[in-house]
Image (tube, rainbow, N blue to C red):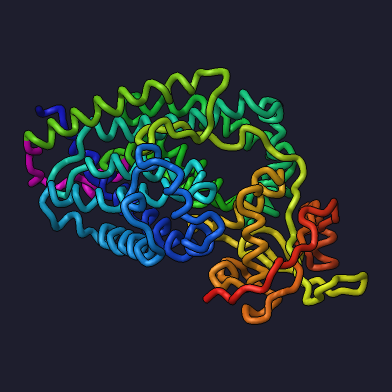
Amino acid sequence: MEWFTADSYWLSRLVLQRMLAALYLVAFLGAALQFRALIGARGMLPVPRFVANVPFRRAPGLFHLHYSDRFFALCAWTGCAVAAALLAGADGLLPLWAAMLLWSVPWVLYLSIVNVGQTWYGFGWESLLLEVGFLAVFLAGDDVAPPVLVLFLLRWVLFRVEFGAGLIKMRGDACWRKLTCLYFHHETQPMPGPLSWFFHRLPRPVHRVEAAANHVTQLVVPFLLFTPQPVATGAALLMIATQLWLVLSGNFAWLNWLTIVLAVSAVDFPLLFGDAAAPPTDLAAPPLWYEVLVLVVTAALLGLSLRPARNLFSRRQLMNFSFDPLHLVNSYGAFGSVNRLRQEVVIEGTADTVPGADSVWLEYEFRGKPGDVRRWPRQFAPYHLRLDWMMWFAGLSPAYARAWFGPFVERLLDGDRDTLRLLRRVPFPADAPPAQVRAGLYRYRFATWRELRADGVWWRRTYVREFWPPTRLSSPRGRRP
């Protein structure tokens, strides 16, 4: 079948695969370094308790077959090793069937992690990584041109990511329709980056242009992905530029980078760079078994796409929702509503067993979320600080923290080393934890130019109310290793 492959997208496939391998590496590294405190056997939301109550068919993965912290660590570090090998181009040294098997390994491992990750892995970019990772299995190796059908499916994913996000905005907060949401977004987003303060201080007319450009990119440009070249390449490049703007303005884990990966699949590099980006002249014809497999997978995924497609045009559009436990075809979206105020949960501890008016309360500081008003926001994306993100949700409503905040406080009181490693600054040593821990809710806002120059502060904060009352352990416990 001569139509089956597209030689001119050979370099697009290569760039996509290497970028995807890098994001897999980041995702597995985050899992390896954070899991013990979050979902480990003694974590805040333990995997053993989860798999005991949720059947395999609802959350398929390796950890239903066996779980121990050592086995989870083995899976996570194996994922890192395979992702690093793919980043280095190991798949290009293998025959087609072996390269497909190698790309299947990180997908199976990360699916297993996401399906037991519970609240900590409930983000849309987890499903997006799995959906793109599954398609990457069928992109073939370096000696075969990429199949047209898989390239089409990648564009279909990109269309749902962008168009779904555009629709959820237009159906959601009125400020998107009034072009005023960016008056607030850079200040109230989950985890501001080092340039977010400067983005927030842009003139309001510029914010309105940003919002209007966002609507064009998400509601109009996605349709151009399915037009002939060079229009499709132009649409993809415009999406890449928009995503890089978002990378500069905040920390959204690997969402923006993975969207860029998808956009690369629509770029015709020989069209841009001529013979310098031309494919090899000795590409082999794809074997029959491979063509049949891709046809079957495409038909299955198009069938599964019916529900996400209907969801796009539903008045009750679901955002970041998986329609199957394998996360093969999902719905996406972001910021259907924008907060006007930023509220942060600030956690403090004291050595006093019975706190009084003169007790000294010392503040815990997180790596990414705002805390110390003098600390300039840092860049962490594409690395995902899961606890910091959930603390932002907790500031929106205590309901988001109902399942894990109590266990988190307990681990601070117990001096749990795995939990303390997730924080930037811990005011008490692990072998002498606080006697009491409390949390307050504060209103944060970016400092003005004058406040920054005069006081050296990036934020101003005001106490709102108690979030968690002073709490101590009900009985002494052995220290966690």
Residue 418 on image: x %, y %: 54, 69
Name the residue at 79% across, 68% down: 456
For residue 461, side relative to residue 129 (left or right):
right
For residue 433, side relative to residue 156 (left or right):
right
Q: Which residues are magenta?
A: 272-287
Name the residue at 76% across, 59% down: 439
Residue 265 belongs to the span the image colors magenta = no
Task: Reply above or below: 42 against 295.
Answer: below
Relative depth, front residue between 11 and 117: 117
Residue furthest front in the image:
475
Name the residue at 10% across, 44% down: 283
Image quarter where the N terminus lies is top left
Magenta: main secondary structure equals loop
Residue 216 on image: x %, y %: 54, 28
Is residue 97 among what the camera can see?
A: yes
Give the image quarter of residue 323.
Answer: top left
Relative depth, front residue between 411 and 214: 411
